[in-house]
Amino acid sequence: MPALALASSSPRRLDLLRAVGIEPEVLPADIDEVRSEGEAARDYVARLAEEKARAIADRADMADRFVLGADTVVVLGDEVMEKPTSRAEAKRMLTSLAGSKRHDVFTGVAVLGQGRAAVTVVATAVWFVDLAEDDIEAYLDTGEFEGKAGAYAIQGHGSVLVERIEGTFPNVVGLPVATVDDLLRTFGHRLRDFA
């Protein structure tokens, strides 16, 4: 039976895998997450997802496992929003996202195994409702913004911020599970093989 390692400390990614009956070995990758000058958001998350997976897959004891890496960012126009480093930065992000303008959530997904890699990027379009300053402050008071790309969690209190999405909901949470299944097919497996 094949084994799956998750190169992430994200409890949301783990929850999404557990929801489909997968209990991966959690081995967070320790890499520098720095976007290169002029690097497109899609290229950035694809690179980080593969680097995370490779950091774990290159260990000698991982030869018989598949390793899953992922990285998510929120993009509004030319601005790439990662995890805010302060409440003030989170407030600025949420203020920018509020209203009827579209932002995109990009998740890079990488599966490494059998000496090769399968990597892709999934995009989901998101629109927020109009938000008054007190709406934003109330959301920030939940503390949920911490550690979240774009300063919100669509699966939690942040669900009240979202007017609509086009694309896959799990992608906005941080892991497009159907895409993981598709990537595993290129290795002759399915997610259910890891249950």
Image (spheres, grey):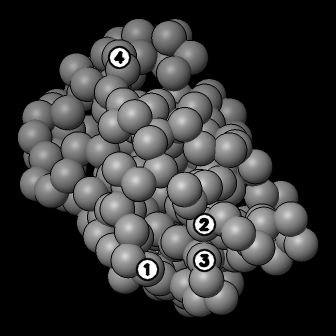
Specify which label sits upstream in the sequence, 1 or 2. Answer: 2
Picture quarter with the C terminus = top left
Q: Residues within 10 Å of mark 2 (few under 14, many from 20)?
A: many
Is the residue under label 1 in contact with that under label 3 (CB below 8 Å)?
A: yes
Is the residue under label 3 in contact with that under label 2 (CB below 8 Å)?
A: yes
Specify which label sits upstream in the sequence, 3 or 4. Answer: 3
What's the residue type where badge 3 is placed? Gly
Residue shown at 36%/20% (left/top)? 156
Specify which label sits upstream in the sequence, 2 or 4. Answer: 2
Q: Position of residue 29 (x, y in %)?
A: 77, 58
Specify which label sits upstream in the sequence, 1 or 4. Answer: 4
- Outermost residue on the right side: it is 60
Question: Which label belongs to residue 187?
Answer: 1
Labels 1, 4: front one = 1
Specify which label sits upstream in the sequence, 3 or 1. Answer: 3
State the residue position of label 3: 113
State the residue position of label 4: 157
State the residue position of label 2: 66
Q: Position of residue 48 (x, y in %)?
A: 63, 72
Separation of marks 3 and 4 at Cα, in angstroms: 37 Å
Separation of marks 2 and 3 at Cα, in angstroms: 5 Å
Is the residue under label 4 in contact with that under label 2 (CB below 8 Å)?
A: no
Using the image as rendered, state which of residue 26 and residue 151 is in the foreground: 26
Q: Secondary structure at mark 1?
A: loop
